[in-house]
Each structure stands twice: as C-alpha cells, then as structure tokens.
Amino acid sequence: MAEAVTTIDEASDIPALRITRQMAAPREAVFAALTKPEALMKWFGPDGATTKVADVDLRPGGRYRFEMHGSEGGIHSVGGVYREIDPPARLVFTWVWEQTHLDLVGRETLVTIELVQRESGTELTLIHEGLRDAEHREQHGWGWNSGFDCLDTYLAAA
C-alpha cells in the first residue's frame, strides 16, 4: 500500500483538501490511469464502487463524466470540464456532483493533480478546492484516499 499524507488547508475560508501519495509506477502510467476511460472503469471510485461510465474528452474545455455504482446500490455521478492538461505532469478540472447522497449536487469545486517522477515511482499530489465545509472535505478525503488505494492495486497489476 502506498504512503498517504492528507493535509487540510486551515488558512483559507474555503476548505481545501491536499493528498500526497507515492505510487510505485512511472508517472506516464499514472497519468494514463487518470485519463483513459478503459483504465478509469477498472479502478476509479472508492473501494466497493464500480465505475460503469467513464466519458473523457481529454482537452482543455473538454468534458468528463463518471458514474459510480456503490456496493449498496447507490449511484454517484460526477462531471466537469478539463481546464489544464500537461501530460504526464498535471491535470486541472472542475468537479460537479450530478447525483450523490451528499448535499453537494451542482456545486462546482476544483481539482488539481500533479505528478512528479521520483526514483521509487511517482509522487501524486491532489488538491481539491472549494469544498463547502470541513464535513465535505473529510468525506472527499475518504473518497479520494480509498480511490487511490484502488489505483495502487490497478497499477500493481498492470
């Protein structure tokens, strides 16, 4: 299991989540897993969820949409627009819940993912900005960390 470091930005009035993970794979492989629909459908989402839809138009201004089915039957769909794409180093995109149990449907937040090649693999840093409050920051932190555990498993088997 990769080392996970989660920090909270307490200096801002708008809650932000920052997660740093070490992935035992080259950053090109990590970037591909973050952007290719066939890869996303194999790992994206928290443990126990299955991604049934992964639509990706990977270009600035392009849209994406993921539909995750929870182990208890709930459907969680999220979409947004890619703002910045710098393969294999950086992705910036909006994040808007379309359907979820969280009361965040329609609220736009911003996700930045940076990938740095290290001797042992890739350092992945995620910053999720604009979350409404500490509770939603914690829920997203759980979701992202669980999803990155699934990404670790996917990369190890690839």
Image (spheres, rainbow, N blue to C red):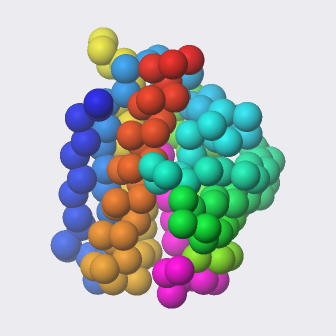
| Residue 50 in the figure: left or right of residue 17 | right
How many discs mark residues in the rendered view? 0
| Residue 128 in the figure: left or right of residue 32 | left
| Residue 7 in the figure: left or right of residue 74 | left
**Residue positioned 73% across, 34% down in the render:** 38
Does residue 16 appear anywhere in the picture? no
Which x, y percent locates residue 70? 56, 62
Q: 75 or 25, which lies in front?
A: 75
Tell me the quarter of the image containing the C terminus: top right
On screen, residue 9 above or below 5: below
**Is 112 one of the magenta-colored residues?**
yes
Which x, y percent locates residue 63? 77, 58
- Residue 21, picture quadrant: top left
The part of the chain drawn in magenta is: 101-113
Q: Residue furthest bottom?
A: 103
On screen, residue 59 above or below 87: below
